[in-house]
Amino acid sequence: MKIVFNNTRFDPDLIEFHSIAKKMAKSVGYTAGLTVETQLAQLLRLRVAQINPARIA
């Protein structure tokens, strides 16, 4: 008996929006060139994640 696997997982690289989302994340995310200290930026992100009920885990 041969088992056939069909990968039905969503691949975000197949849609145009994903490249736009990457640029947006880079401008405000962990790799952004922020003007605050690294540790302070991490604490700020943690606090925002705690406050924001719509966050994606």
Image: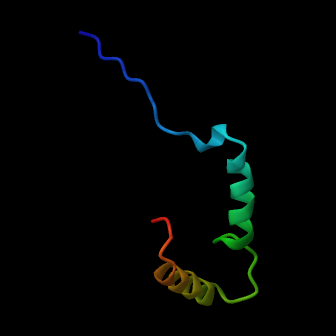
Does 9 sit above or below residue 57? above
Q: Quadrant of the N terminus?
A: top left
Indicate left or right for 16 with 9 as reference. right
- Residue situated in front as seen by the camera: 2 or 57: 57
Check the image and name the residue furthest to the top: 1
User: Quick check: 7 above or below 44?
Assistant: above
Query: Is residue 12 found left or right of 10 in the rendered image?
Result: right
Visual colour scheme: rainbow
* Residue 2 locus on image (x, y percent): 29, 11
Q: Is residue 46 left or right of residue 24?
A: left
Indicate the position of residue 16 as horizontal and vertical percent values: 72, 43
Query: In x, y percent, where is residue 14?
Result: 65, 37
Please, which residue is most extreme toward the front here? Answer: 53
Position of residue 26 in the picture relative to residue 4 (left or right) = right
The total number of labels drawn is: 0
Q: Relative to 27, does residue 12 appear above or below in the rendering?
A: above
Name which residue lies at 72% across and 50% down: 19
Reply above or below: 36 against 20.
below
Q: Residue furthest left?
A: 1
Image quarter hosting the C terminus: bottom left
Identify which residue, 4 or 50, lies in the foreground.
50
| Residue 4 lies in quadrant | top left
Q: Residue at x 67, y 89 (%)?
A: 37
